[in-house]
Image (spheres, rainbow, N blue to C red):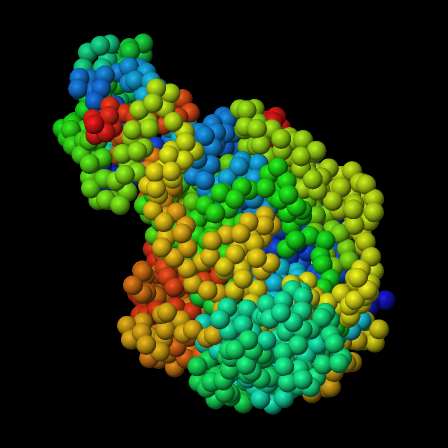
């Protein structure tokens, strides 16, 4: 018997000859169906270097293109973060690109909202219609415009803020924002003067350094193995194998928890209790870094107890304004402290004194009192963890300090204590001096981009003709109350909903949503739908129809998948490029759509819009673009800056991926940077008001009263009216408003979290991903399952006063008794049914999440994790839901040819 | 889907005035051409993007209009679909559809009373009463008035309530224009706010 | 001269983070149909007493047995050992779909391809290794947990990773004389090996 090596290509030839049904089977699922006659021709396959955008990780990939079609995705080994690996989501890109459900053309709604009747229109008609509406709104009152984006579908995040600045008003929201990344991204650098410590948003760079291993990494509500699989997940894994110790604080036993030295299965919503427990333990056992705490934090400074703010020496008439005040044991009196230190003083760290005729504690004393009740035992009781495990975790972290670090994840951004959790983490790290040393997550090195984005609003670099007016900033819905939203120039979703529903304080009328599926992603989405139906004109831009399109949109615009877009990604010391390798149908990169709106406004005489095309007005943010080539020129110029060169897009394509510095320089530039002399000859310190780390978070208090830590609003410098309640400088634990301790009707507490095959609402219509995880699993501890009366594989109802959804039970010890886990989900297969709303109702946890008060004061965060539910057995799956692999065959790729995209049919 | 005219009007705020205009125009059977013209004349906002046919179809679906088919000017006993499938109709016959307001449609128009809507709006928001009347009065101007001008007028008259804690104005002129427009007292025309007939009657 | 190499994949379960990238990479590389798998990952656990529990993930595929029962049992020689690479492969053109090998394979890692009624399985991506590339699953693996190579060559990736561990940490699926080549590494810190009798067959 001849042992022929059967190659894949010749099998296609053989099988196609044998049966005509190959293409339908799904065999050629990511290949163009091969004409048997051509199978033997040498077809040149191009390999294009690019950067994936299935999620925010932006991993370097090699895209194989043949005959104008994408045929394979692999990792690029040059990528210092992903090292040539690629995850399931990246591998799903071809099925996403050629998904038969892509929105191919612009459409206008023909029937009523919810009927799913559409008529195709040209891009010109679409842009003109939208621009006419924008002009009308602009003339009536620009604040009546609401625009939104989301994390899924390769968003160009700040492109929306840029648009609003050229438009001259409007409200921006995003279902994440106050419920995702903003709380950490704003709070941490405000207090630590360095960075936020998100692994998934690529702000933790230390874990990619192969020349040194951190002593300990604490993943607090973070699971890089599922949220940042190829980069953070891979890197943390590699470091674990090199001996880095890890602690995981997470209600779920994730892969990172499974491999950790200690897993603390924390009750959802109790992170601040745990943090205060850590703080008390560290202080009581005298484990903190005395030198760092004394010299490099604001903890020795004396507090004006009336204002909660730290004294400045001029207030007490003993020095200048930029000196804070400490208690000098030598003179037994308050003394001014010049930056950075005065060796003549013998400063008392922990005390309460009389200053200016009234009581004044050091910030350290205030911290001690703030955590007084948080013994290990009490912490264990509230957090549902074991005291010995908590101690073990802290000991590991402390032992590794000052080469330990805490990475904090999205979990704590998603409920009422969204500001308090990053405050707590900052205090812990400040006590242990884990700042800008080898192995720390807190580092002063800056990425080339901002949160992975390098397309900017105009006002980011200083005053600009496009800087929002003071009136505009004040009128953003909900921001006076929740000042932290201004860090992302965002408005408060519940306040927007109230305005749309009641008309107060004014009636928003037009909504442009660049995003997937608001009804799957926004908290308590049925109430969101009811409110948004009051909008007069709604535009939805996305890659495929979702429930936002069907339930709400008047016009839908087809956007590009990442393989059809151009961009870049800075990866540690490297720049990677994203290449638009194909353009299909009339898809357009959403970035261009916004600029086409502006161009159409300019044509209608909108002055600001006209100005935004003139580089002289635009500063470093650059002018708007008429076409994709102009946009690419901007991208290339930005990336070339890092190399000190001026690049065209062709240059960038040729040269990237490439390092702009060595990894060693990139990493080590941050180490001890606070000690290095700055321009004034003094140690540089940290980028805070005091130039010290500020675990006593008066910056939060000042933000609440004025708009920002420096006494006026972020970016634009307006002094805003105070919020109705003061933001506190230290984190107090607050029991969740819906608590399993007290809610008898709903005795279980539910949380969410990533699975590695989905990114937000995306990829539920990609066959390979649905096959891996066809329905959301409801994780229930065996004890609780027995109590409820469900077994593994049963379907269940999850309900509370807001609604009822379903999930399929997974009985597992990976969650504590009474803790439930289920990830977000929606069912694209139900969009074509008689009731398309079932697509987002039957198994979507956001039907039952909580969007009413109490909100987090600082950011207005509502509650997506840590609320209460009841569970009961269901007879079976919701009707019509697809669960079997063969059902997903309907979504197998329809490979299609290069068209030039929407750019070929519309000229701005 | 629930078919209800009041729901239709409430859920499609951009089109409510157009729906009513069509219902008022169809006391007798009207052709699509006549109604299309009527609709185009009544359009006041760029948000009204649907075609006349789509607007009329919505009214038919929600029970506001009934239809009949004419074949060569004669009433045909059947639907458009029936006519298309009917072999006895010659290929070159002229087949058209006409629309007449149903009783439900008549009732929906008759119960629409902008004056009472406006009165009710003012009665249920007594703290805004001064603001409503100031806006109505200002919008009587020949060329209408802009939102910015209304904001100035309201602020100077002290008609904008303030939060007792931080002094922030709790409503903006755009609250008043939005509420009054919905109630039928104002319309946006030629880039400015203008008072309607109903608004004038209340304003007096 | 027939090859004496013993090419196989070694999976370090200490590193496997259960990301399913290997399953998907295999699908892309080999065009595996929906509902069919050449490589499939199974979570094992969690087991133990809460909260001190353990879990690992077990990627499974053809174990490249030295005495492959699937080769012995095939009536037409479609299931064969490649003389050049020594890898167990399937000649689909010769396969008659009798399913004897499905019964013979102790692990149930062979797949009946519905469209053609022939058997498919992991080929160690011989179309890639012939070009000097690694199998798709090995390349993609985000845990950096998969290693390929000749177990008889101490310089191969597969051999080198095995050499880093104690014998006690190296495991194989049940061996009833078929001698699976594929090796799994699992240290007690990351989990107690429970997969001695693992099989993908449903009874």
Q: Quadrant of the C terminus of chain A?
A: top right
Q: Nearer the viewer, residue B29 or C198?
A: B29
In-image side of A596 versus B32 (left or right): right
Q: Residue at x 73, y 62 (%)?
A: A445
Q: Nearer the viewer, residue A754 or A281?
A: A281
The quadrant where residue A905 appears: top right
Q: Nearer the viewer, residue C119 or C34?
A: C34
Residue A290 in view in this figure: no
Reply above or below: C96 against A50: below
Residue C53 spot, x, y in % from top left: 53, 83
Q: Residue at x 22, y 10 (%)?
A: B73
Q: Nearer the viewer, residue B169 or A107?
A: B169
Reply above or below: A472 against C188: above
Residue A296 in view in this figure: yes
Reply above or below: A900 against A782: above
What number of labels is visible? 0
Q: Quadrant of the N terminus of chain A?
A: bottom right
Q: Residue at x 36, y 59 (%)?
A: A852
Reply above or below: C197 against A715: below
Residue A350 spot, x, y in % from top left: 60, 84
In-image side of B158 versus A559 (left or right): left
Residue B166 spot, x, y in % from top left: 41, 55
The quadrant where residue A832 appears: top left
The quadrant where residue B49 appears: top left
Residue A483 spot, x, y in % from top left: 50, 56
Q: Residue at x 45, y 45 (%)?
A: A475
């Amino acid at each position: 018997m001849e042992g022929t090596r059967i190659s894949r290509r010749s099998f296609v030839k053989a099988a196609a000859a044998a049966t005509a049904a190959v293409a339908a089977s799904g065999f050629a699922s990511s290949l163009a169906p091969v004409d048997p006659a051509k199978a033997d021709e040498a077809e040149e396959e191009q390999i294009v270097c690019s950067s994936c955008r299935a999620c925010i990780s932006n991993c370097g990939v090699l895209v194989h293109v043949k005959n104008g079609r994408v045929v394979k995705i692999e990792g690029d080994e040059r990528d210092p973060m992903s090292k040539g690996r690629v995850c399931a989501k990246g591998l799903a890109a071809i099925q996403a690109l050629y998904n038969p459900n892509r929105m191919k053309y612009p459409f206008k709604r023909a029937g009523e909202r919810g009927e799913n009747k559409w008529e195709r229109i040209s891009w010109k008609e679409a842009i003109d219609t939208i621009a006419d509406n924008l002009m009308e709104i602009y003339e009536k009152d620009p604040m009546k415009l609401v625009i939104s984006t989301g994390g899924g579908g390769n968003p160009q995040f700040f492109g929306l803020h840029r648009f609003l600045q050229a438009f001259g008003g409007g409200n921006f929201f995003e279902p994440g924002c106050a419920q995702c990344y903003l709380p950490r991204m704003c709070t941490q650098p405000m207090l630590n003067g360095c960075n936020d410590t998100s692994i998934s948003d690529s702000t933790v760079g230390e874990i990619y350094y192969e020349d040194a291993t951190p002593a300990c990494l604490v993943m607090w509500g973070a699971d890089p193995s599922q949220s940042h699989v190829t980069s953070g997940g891979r890197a943390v894994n590699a470091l674990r194998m090199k001996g880095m110790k890890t602690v995981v604080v997470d209600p779920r036993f994730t892969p990172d928890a499974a491999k950790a030295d200690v897993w603390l299965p924390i009750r959802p919503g109790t992170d601040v209790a745990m943090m205060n427990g850590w703080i008390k333990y560290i202080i009581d056992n005298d484990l903190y870094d005395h030198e760092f705490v004394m010299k490099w934090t604001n903890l020795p400074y004396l507090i004006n107890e009336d204002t909660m703010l730290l004294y400045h020496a001029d207030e007490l008439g003993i020095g200048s304004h930029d000196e804070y005040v400490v208690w000098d044991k030598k003179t037994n009196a308050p003394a001014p402290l010049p930056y950075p230190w005065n060796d003549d003083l013998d400063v008392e760290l922990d005390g309460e004194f009389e200053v200016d005729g009234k009581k004044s504690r050091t910030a350290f004393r205030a911290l001690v009192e703030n955590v007084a009740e948080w013994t290990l035992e009490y912490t264990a009781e509230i957090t549902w963890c074991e005291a010995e495990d908590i101690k073990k975790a802290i000991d590991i972290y402390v032992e590794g300090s000052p080469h330990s670090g805490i990475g904090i994840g999205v979990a704590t951004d998603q409920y009422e204590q969204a500001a308090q959790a990053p405050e707590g983490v900052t205090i812990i790290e400040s006590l242990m001096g884990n700042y800008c040393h080898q192995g720390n997550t807190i580092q002063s090195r800056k990425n080339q981009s901002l949160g992975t984005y390098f397309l900017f609003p105009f006002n980011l670099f200083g005053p600009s003709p496009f800087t929002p007016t003071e009136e505009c900033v004040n009128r953003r819905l909900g921001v006076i109350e929740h000042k932290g939203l201004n860090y992302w120039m965002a408005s408060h979703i519940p306040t927007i909903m109230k305005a749309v529903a009641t008309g107060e304080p004014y009636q928003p009328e037009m909504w442009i949503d660049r995003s997937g599926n608001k009804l799957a992603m926004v908290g308590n989405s049925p109430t969101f739908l009811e409110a948004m139906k009051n909008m007069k004109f709604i535009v939805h831009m996305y890659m495929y129809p979702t429930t936002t399109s069907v339930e709400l949109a008047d016009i839908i615009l087809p956007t590009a998948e990442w393989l059809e877009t151009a961009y870049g990604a800075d990866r540690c010391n490297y720049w990677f490029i994203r290449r638009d390798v194909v353009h299909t149908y009339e898809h357009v990169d959403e970035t261009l759509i916004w600029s086409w709106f502006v161009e159409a406004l300019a044509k209608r005489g909108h002055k600001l819009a006209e100005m935004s095309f003139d580089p002289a007005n635009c500063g470093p943010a650059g002018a708007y673009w008429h076409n994709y080539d102009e946009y690419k020129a901007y991208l290339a110029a930005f990336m070339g800056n890092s190399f000190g060169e001026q690049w065209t897009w062709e240059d960038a394509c040729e040269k990237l991926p490439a390092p702009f510095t060595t990894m060693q320089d990139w990493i080590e530039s941050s180490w001890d940077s606070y000690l290095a002399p700055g321009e004034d000859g003094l140690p540089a310190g940290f980028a805070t008001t005091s130039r010290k780390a500020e675990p006593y978070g008066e910056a939060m208090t000042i933000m609440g009263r004025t708009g920002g830590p420096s006494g006026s609003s972020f970016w634009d410098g307006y002094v805003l009216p105070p919020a109705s309640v003061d933001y506190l400088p230290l984190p107090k634990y607050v029991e969740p408003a819906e608590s399993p301790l007290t809610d008898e009707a709903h005795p279980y507490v539910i949380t969410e979290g990533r699975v590695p095959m989905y990114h937000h609402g995306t990829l539920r219509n990609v066959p390979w991903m649905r096959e891996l995880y066809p329905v959301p699993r409801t994780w229930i501890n065996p004890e609780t399952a027995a109590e409820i009366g469900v077994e593994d594989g049963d379907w269940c109802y999850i309900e509370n006063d807001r609604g009822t959804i379903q999930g399929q039970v997974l009985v597992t010890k990976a969650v504590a008794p009474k803790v439930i886990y289920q990830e977000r989900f929606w069912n694209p297969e139900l969009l074509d049914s008689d009731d398309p709303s079932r697509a987002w109702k039957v198994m979507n946890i956001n039907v039952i999440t909580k969007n009413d008060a109490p909100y987090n004061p600082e950011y207005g965060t509502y509650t997506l994790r840590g609320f209460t539910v009841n569970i009961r057995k269901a007879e079976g799956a919701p009707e019509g839901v697809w669960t079997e692999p063969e059902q997903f065959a309907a979504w197998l790729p329809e490979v299609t040819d290069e068209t030039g995209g929407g750019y070929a049919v519309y000229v701005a | 889907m629930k078919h209800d005219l009041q729901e239709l009007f409430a859920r499609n705020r951009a089109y409510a005035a157009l729906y009513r205009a069509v219902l008022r125009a169809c006391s007798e059977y009207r052709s699509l051409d006549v109604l299309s013209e009527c609709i185009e004349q009544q359009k006041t906002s760029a948000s009204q993007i649907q075609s006349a046919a789509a607007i009329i179809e919505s009214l038919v679906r929600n029970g506001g209009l009934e239809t009949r088919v004419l074949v060569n000017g004669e009433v045909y006993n059947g639907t458009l679909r029936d006519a298309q499938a009917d072999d006895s109709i010659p290929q070159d016959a002229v087949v058209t559809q006409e629309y007449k307001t149903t009783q439900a449609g008549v009732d929906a128009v008759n119960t629409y009373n902008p004056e009472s809507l406006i009165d009710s709006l003012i009665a249920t928001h007594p703290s805004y009463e001064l603001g409503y009347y100031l806006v109505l009065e200002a919008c009587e101007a020949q060329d209408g008035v802009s939102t910015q001008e209304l904001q100035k007028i309201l602020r100077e008259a002290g008609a904008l309530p303030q939060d007792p804690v931080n002094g922030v104005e709790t409503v903006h002129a755009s609250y008043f224009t939005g509420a009054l427009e919905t109630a039928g007292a104002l319309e946006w025309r030629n880039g400015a706010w203008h008072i309607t007939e109903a608004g004038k009657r209340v304003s007096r | 001269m027939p090859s004496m190499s013993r090419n196989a994949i070694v999976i370090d379960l200490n590193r496997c983070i259960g990301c399913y990238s290997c399953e998907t990479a295999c699908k892309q590389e080999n065009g595996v149909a929906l509902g069919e798998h050449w490589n499939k990952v199974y979570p094992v656990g969690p087991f133990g007493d809460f909260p001190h529990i353990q879990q690992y993930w077990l990627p499974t595929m053809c174990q490249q047995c030295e005495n492959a029962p699937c080769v012995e049992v095939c009536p037409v020689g479609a299931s064969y050992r490649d003389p050049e690479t020594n890898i167990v492969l399937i000649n689909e053109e010769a396969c008659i779909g009798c399913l004897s090998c499905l019964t013979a394979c102790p692990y149930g890692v062979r797949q009946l391809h519905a469209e053609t009624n022939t058997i498919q399985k992991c080929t160690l991506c011989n179309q890639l290794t012939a070009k000097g590339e690694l199998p798709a699953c090995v390349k993609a693996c985000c845990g950096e947990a998969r290693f390929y190579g000749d177990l008889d060559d101490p310089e191969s990736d597969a051999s080198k990773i095995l050499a880093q561990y104690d014998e006690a940490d190296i495991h194989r699926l049940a061996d009833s004389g078929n001698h699976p080549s594929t090796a799994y590494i699992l240290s007690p810190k990351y989990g107690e090996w429970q997969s001695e009798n693992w099989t993908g067959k449903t009874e």
